[in-house]
């Protein structure tokens, strides 16, 4: 070797593989305004579609007259349910096994529901035409409170289901009942409660909110009538699923449908489902023969395309006097709005809510979920969440605090006492999951030491005394949250969407000169896949990440995948990528053996090539091997260097973390200020620490917003309130706290690279940390549970109710 | 089309003078995106809260979704497309956003960088609090702002040390 | 969210603008910064057929002082108010308040005239102008007339401004040097209207209050000048009992809506708390 020969470390660094803080390749275009989002797309002859929407939350439609609208020059068509019936698309199936109106068919079930679709030459004319479509409504009694959905005299929301006693998930017990889902051992749990020293029982609500990415949902549909081919560009987190659904609904063969998800301006679960806007744009393009663009505005986004949460969780824990938990019993009333359009794997009507035993070793547990209809928008999407794990984590983390209070134990100590222990993994939970790996005690101890937990408790106590003496009007809360997530949907034995197993895929092609193009079934909405996927490949096959192009979102070129949501990209597609790369490396090994004239068993892998064992001077780099694969492959070997992998994970992954929130509350105004927020995450192997930290920052900011005020509210007459960014709480840089991040690493034993996924952890663990901080602050005044969201007036109200205003 | 006459709007955008005839109600954001094909500025909320549509007009940061193109007649406009260095390399701010991981989905980024550009012109040495106040008209759903603050600090430092920067190059 | 059609006018003088308003009556609306009117137009809750853009009238810009009165021309932006040396010296409460309005982008284009003229109870400047006992110059076909800010507001979006008039300037009596002042605003986030806010102007004579003026934002369908509270404070030493009775007097005149910012009871209480805190800061400043 001469001085110019790079060292092993230099060769490794040059790869920018796993574990390095690689700068994002996406940023070069995004920082210059050169991203390509749906609304940036312009096609020759393209027209614009927009909705006439219902001002009423529950009403019969007696007339739709578009005569005046159609007189406006530039208005091309006004579609109604009657038109859609001609193509059998007035209703569409939902992912949850229900059906949903595409356009109002005789009645509306929520305010702002889609009533007619105006197609016009541009968005200005379309908006003018909307004002002139004459719709007559006959108002019906409105059902807002889910606790009244199953009253005997509750209004009938869904006459289309009249007489249907069986839903997609078993028997329906009332005309507004959707499903009941039970998990766990009821008798064992009852026994635990009968024998308990201490029990708690609290109704814990997780309010309705919305993912609200900065870019709304939008699409361009273009039907080529000559070729019989449909192309749809859209904000799709799962483009292949959209293609399959579009084919099933439209009867256009799947190979003649091209679905393309270009750059997406955030998703957070909002862009998983199929919405009326997509269907109407497709139909309108089929009808008019020109491309049709649909772009929802912010009010439409917040009030119609998919809420999240809205779970009302009656939670009971049985425990012994020493704090050992012995049983968990949860009943959930789930408000699904007018249609059950939850975006869950098909067999899971309440998602993975049965992760509700959390990080604790409950010997017995029982869960029952009832879904009901109300006059609210449909949805139930996983807002930065793996299918109701956010609700489950909030439920158990809040309940553990309430139990600690009843036992007069410190909430951190109670958690530590009940943690699943490191030597119990793989751990079988009472509600049916097998946790893959974890070391909760180590993570919790590190977090408590770093934040100075005991000192904070001492400070809090001093402040409480000062408050009682009237020396201050400020109190202090410490929020503890130790969450276990369940992500990576999922194993085909558990998970499918409309019958398609929830695998994911990767294809890698190494070109003769040693550069690479790779395509996956996932779709980044800001997660930085173009950067991180290349890092996995770089480490696995020794080609620099900069020489690897990653492409997602085009169903014509990418292998079939189920898309990006539920933190599934790294656990599922990340594994497919590693396995595809290993296929390439295996072939490369055979080629290298041929080139070096040795047996492949005499070779060993070394960073970016193969070398002869005991003779590292005799080596072939991947670049040389790639050339050989196309130039002179070994006899009897197919030329080329490509691989595809479809990965059906053997299990979910279970990331976890310890979060602490220190909050100061002004009792007189209810204003809460987050003094410190510390987040320790364990997501197994870390692919790009910079991106992980960014994901945690973003998720914590969403958690902060949700816990402290972000809500889709309805008044008692069904009007949706605050569907704009004035009222829907998206914090600015001023309100957003400073985040401290930390980590431990417990790899997943079943994942090829040991990675678990992290994008959603901060939302899952963050919300209980904030809520527990608020609740903890008022505990010394007798508080047990204050419902979210914790905006200033509600905190003030709680303080008042607890007598803190004198 | 309506009876209302189209009106001429002449602006200088990113150094180039352009004129178009538009309906008076044409919003500046649509003028830029649809008439001039400058799709860097985005539409996020349409109610002047999110700032994704931010452009610089006569040295001020404005939200182009809440302004008629007619109001900008005669103005000098700069959009994200005009932010790079004259030689085409990333500006200090653009580089700062990349180095500090100040963006994720990229949708707020053009407005955020354009706003930060004007902020740094007015206040070349902002404190963290001044940066946070200065970008409070721009919402980001992805980053939690912490790395955006760092990105702007990175740029401020770069811009305040031109000699060092040149020496390093 | 697309506005309806309108004819656009860009006059270069106040007289020209008034003439356009006169000829179109109710169908015309003046446009200043536009951040109240344009969103309403995009929601089609406002649909003027003629839009009169005041942005081309050079005469509507500027801040000056003459004979104990500060005059701010209507199209002066909040950004310009914040940057004014004259105001920083003579009326610092204007900068303090302006910085709490909306966000930086909106402050570049939002104007004082637009803020006080459109009658939105959420706007901050109307209560501040009442606190400062400002008057508004309204220019119409018959020339100028002046209306006190305390008399200008009738109900939400209803004011003393006639359809053919333009609010062209705000006149504020310069408070004595060394006065105390504070604007306290409780809001959910940057960009929000106040849950409640209070403006306080104080002068002290020795240990007692020589003059006091209190006004409240967004706790009724108009801004509220708290006359009783101001009177109670005047002459006092700001002892706890007096402050409590002044706060009670201010709370008594509120009539807030219940909305996403909180129920009426909360907003009334917050008006009191904001006033109390503004008073404390103003008193500190007055003494120092």
Image: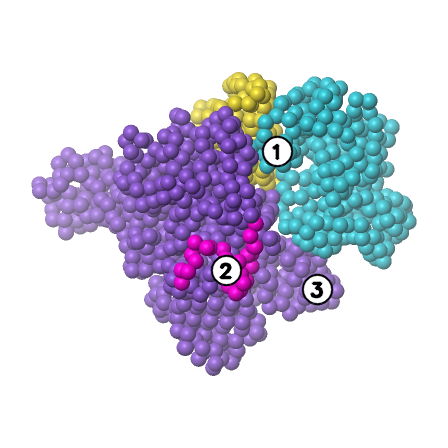
Q: Nearer the viewer, residue C88 or A501?
A: A501
Q: Which residues are magenta?
A: A139-165
Name the quadrant of the C terminus of chain A. bottom right
Both labels 2 and 1 in a single chain: no
Report, in whole angstroms, how far the alpha carbon at label 2 lies from the one at label 1.
Answer: 37 Å
Q: Colour of chain B?
A: yellow
How would you rate the neighbour count of disc 2 (Cα within 10 Å): few for under 14, some for 14-19, many for 20 or more? many
Please give the name of the residue rendered at 30% of the width and 40% of the height, measured from the top-left corner. Answer: A252
Q: State the SS at label 1.
A: helix
Query: Is there any visible trace of residue C36 in the rendered image?
Result: yes
Q: Is residue A69 above or below residue A574?
A: above
Please identify the quarter of the rendering in which residue B138 is found: top right
> Is residue A756 shown left or right of residue A142?
left
Q: Which residue is mark 2?
A: A311
Q: Which residue is mark 3?
A: A804
Point out residue A555 in the picture as x, y percentages from the top left corner. Answer: 31, 40
């Amino acid at each position: 070797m001469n001085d110019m020969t790079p060292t092993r470390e230099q060769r490794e660094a040059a790869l920018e593989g796993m574990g390095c803080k690689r700068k994002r390749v996406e940023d070069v275009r995004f920082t210059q305004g050169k991203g390509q989002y749906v609304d940036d797309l312009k096609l020759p002859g393209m027209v614009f579609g927009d909705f006439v929407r219902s001002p009423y939350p529950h009403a019969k439609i007696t007339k739709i007259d578009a005569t005046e609208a159609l007189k406006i020059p530039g208005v091309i068509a006004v579609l109604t349910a009657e038109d859609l019936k001609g193509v059998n698309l007035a209703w569409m199936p939902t992912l949850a096994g229900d059906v949903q109106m595409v356009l109002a068919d005789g009645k509306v079930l929520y305010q702002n529901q889609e009533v007619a679709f105006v197609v016009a030459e541009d968005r200005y004319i379309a908006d003018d035409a909307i004002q002139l479509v004459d719709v007559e409504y006959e108002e019906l009694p409105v059902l807002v409170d889910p606790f009244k959905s199953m009253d005997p005299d509750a209004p009938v929301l869904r006459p289309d289901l009249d007489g249907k006693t069986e839903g997609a998930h078993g028997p329906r017990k009332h005309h507004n009942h959707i499903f009941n889902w039970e998990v766990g051992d009821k008798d064992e749990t009852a026994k635990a409660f009968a024998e308990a020293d201490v029990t708690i029982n609290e109704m814990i609500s997780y309010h309705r909110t919305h993912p609200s990415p900065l870019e709304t949902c939008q699409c361009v549909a273009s039907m080529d009538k000559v070729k019989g081919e449909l192309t749809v560009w859209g904000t799709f987190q799962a483009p292949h699923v959209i293609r399959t659904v579009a084919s099933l609904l439209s009867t256009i063969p799947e190979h003649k449908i091209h679905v393309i998800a270009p750059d997406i301006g955030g998703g957070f679960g909002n862009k998983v489902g199929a919405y009326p806007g997509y269907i109407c744009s497709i139909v309108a393009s089929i009808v008019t023969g020109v491309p049709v663009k649909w772009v929802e505005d912010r009010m439409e986004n917040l009030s119609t395309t998919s809420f999240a949460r809205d779970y009302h969780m009656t939670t009971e824990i049985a425990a012994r006097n020493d704090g050992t938990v012995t049983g968990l019993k949860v009943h959930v009333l789930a408000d699904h709005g007018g249609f059950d359009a939850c975006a869950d794997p098909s067999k899971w009507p309440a998602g993975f809510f049965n992760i509700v035993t959390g990080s604790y070793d409950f010997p017995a547990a029982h869960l029952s979920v009832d879904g009901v209809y109300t006059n609210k928008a449909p949805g139930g999407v996983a807002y930065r969440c793996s299918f109701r794990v956010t609700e489950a984590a909030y439920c158990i983390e809040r309940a553990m605090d309430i139990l600690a209070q009843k036992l007069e134990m410190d909430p951190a100590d109670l958690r530590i006492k009940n943690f699943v222990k490191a030597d119990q993994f793989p751990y079988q939970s009472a509600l049916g999951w097998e946790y893959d790996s974890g070391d909760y005690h180590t993570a919790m101890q590190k977090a408590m030491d770093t934040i100075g937990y005991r000192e904070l408790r001492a400070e809090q106590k001093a402040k409480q005394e000062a408050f009682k003496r009237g020396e201050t009007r400020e109190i202090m809360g410490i929020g503890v949250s130790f969450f276990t997530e369940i992500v990576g949907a999922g194993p085909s034995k558990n998970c499918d969407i409309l019958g398609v197993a929830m695998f994911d895929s990767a294809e890698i092609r190494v070109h003769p000169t040693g550069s690479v193009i790779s395509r996956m079934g996932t779709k980044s909405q800001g997660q930085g896949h173009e950067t991180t996927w290349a890092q996995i490949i770089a480490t696995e096959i020794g080609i620099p990440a900069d020489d690897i192009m990653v492409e997602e979102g085009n169903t014509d070129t990418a292998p079939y995948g189920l898309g990006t949501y539920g933190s599934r990209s790294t656990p599922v597609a990340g594994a497919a990528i590693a396995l595809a790369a290993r296929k390439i490396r295996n072939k490369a090994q055979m080629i290298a053996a041929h080139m070096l004239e040795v047996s492949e068993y005499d070779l060993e892998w070394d960073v970016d090539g193969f070398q002869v064992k005991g003779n590292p001077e005799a080596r072939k780099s991947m670049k040389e091997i790639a050339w050989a694969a196309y130039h002179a492959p070994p006899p009897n070997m197919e030329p080329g260097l490509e691989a595809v992998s479809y990965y059906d994970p053997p299990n979910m992954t279970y990331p976890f973390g310890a979060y602490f929130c220190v909050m100061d509350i002004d009792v007189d105004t209810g204003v809460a200020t987050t003094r410190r927020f510390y987040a320790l995450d364990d997501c197994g192997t870390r692919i790009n620490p910079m991106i992980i930290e960014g994901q945690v920052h973003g998720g914590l900011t969403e958690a902060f917003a949700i816990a402290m005020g972000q809500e889709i509210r309805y008044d008692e007459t069904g009007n949706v309130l605050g569907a704009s960014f004035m009222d829907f709480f998206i914090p600015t840089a001023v309100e957003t706290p400073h985040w401290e991040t930390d980590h431990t690493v417990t790899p997943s034993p079943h994942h090829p690279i040991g990675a678990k996924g992290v994008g959603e952890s901060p939302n899952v663990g963050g919300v209980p940390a904030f809520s527990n901080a608020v609740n903890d602050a008022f505990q010394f005044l007798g508080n047990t549970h204050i419902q979210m969201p914790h905006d200033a007036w509600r905190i003030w109200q709680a303080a008042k109710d607890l007598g803190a205003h004198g | 089309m309506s009876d209302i006459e189209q009106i001429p709007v002449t602006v200088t955008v990113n150094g180039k003078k352009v004129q178009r005839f538009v309906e008076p109600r044409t919003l500046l954001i649509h003028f830029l995106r649809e008439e001039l094909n400058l799709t860097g500025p985005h539409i996020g909320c349409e109610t002047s809260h999110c700032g994704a549509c931010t452009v610089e007009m006569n040295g001020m940061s404005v939200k182009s979704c809440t302004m008629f193109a007619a109001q900008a007649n005669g103005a000098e406009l700069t959009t994200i497309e005009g932010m790079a260095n004259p030689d085409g390399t990333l500006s200090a701010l653009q580089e700062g956003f990349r180095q500090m991981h100040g963006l994720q989905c990229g949708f707020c980024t053009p407005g955020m960088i354009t706003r930060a550009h004007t902020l740094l012109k007015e206040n070349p040495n902002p404190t963290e609090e001044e940066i946070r106040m200065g970008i409070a008209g721009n919402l980001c759903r992805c980053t939690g702002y912490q790395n955006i603050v760092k990105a702007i600090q990175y740029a401020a430092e770069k811009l305040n040390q031109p000699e060092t920067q040149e020496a390093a190059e | 969210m697309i506005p309806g059609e309108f004819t656009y006018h860009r006059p270069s003088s106040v007289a020209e603008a008034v003439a356009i308003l006169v000829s179109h009556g109710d169908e015309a609306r003046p446009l200043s910064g536009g951040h109240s009117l344009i969103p309403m137009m995009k929601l089609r809750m406002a649909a003027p057929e003629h839009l009169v853009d005041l942005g081309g009238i050079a005469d509507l810009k500027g801040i000056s002082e003459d004979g104990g009165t500060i005059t701010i021309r209507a199209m002066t932006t909040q950004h310009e108010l914040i940057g004014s040396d004259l105001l920083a010296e003579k009326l610092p409460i204007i900068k303090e308040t302006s910085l709490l309005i909306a966000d930086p982008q909106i402050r570049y284009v939002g104007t004082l005239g637009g803020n006080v003229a459109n009658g939105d109870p959420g706007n901050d400047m109307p209560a501040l102008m009442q606190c400062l006992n400002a008057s508004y110059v309204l220019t119409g076909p018959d020339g100028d007339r002046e209306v006190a800010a305390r008399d200008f507001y009738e109900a939400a979006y209803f004011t003393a401004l006639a359809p053919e008039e333009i609010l062209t300037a705000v006149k504020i009596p310069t408070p004595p040097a060394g006065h105390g002042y504070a604007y306290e605003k409780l809001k959910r986030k940057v960009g929000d209207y106040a849950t409640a806010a209070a403006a306080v102007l104080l002068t002290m004579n020795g240990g007692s209050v020589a003059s006091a003026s209190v006004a409240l934002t967004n706790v009724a369908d108009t801004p509220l000048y708290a006359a009783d509270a101001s009177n109670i404070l005047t002459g006092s030493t700001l002892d706890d009992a007096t402050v409590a009775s002044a706060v009670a007097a201010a709370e008594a005149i509120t009539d807030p809506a219940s909305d996403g910012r909180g129920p009426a009871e909360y907003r009334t209480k917050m008006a009191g708390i904001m006033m109390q805190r503004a008073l404390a800061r103003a008193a500190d400043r007055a003494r120092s």
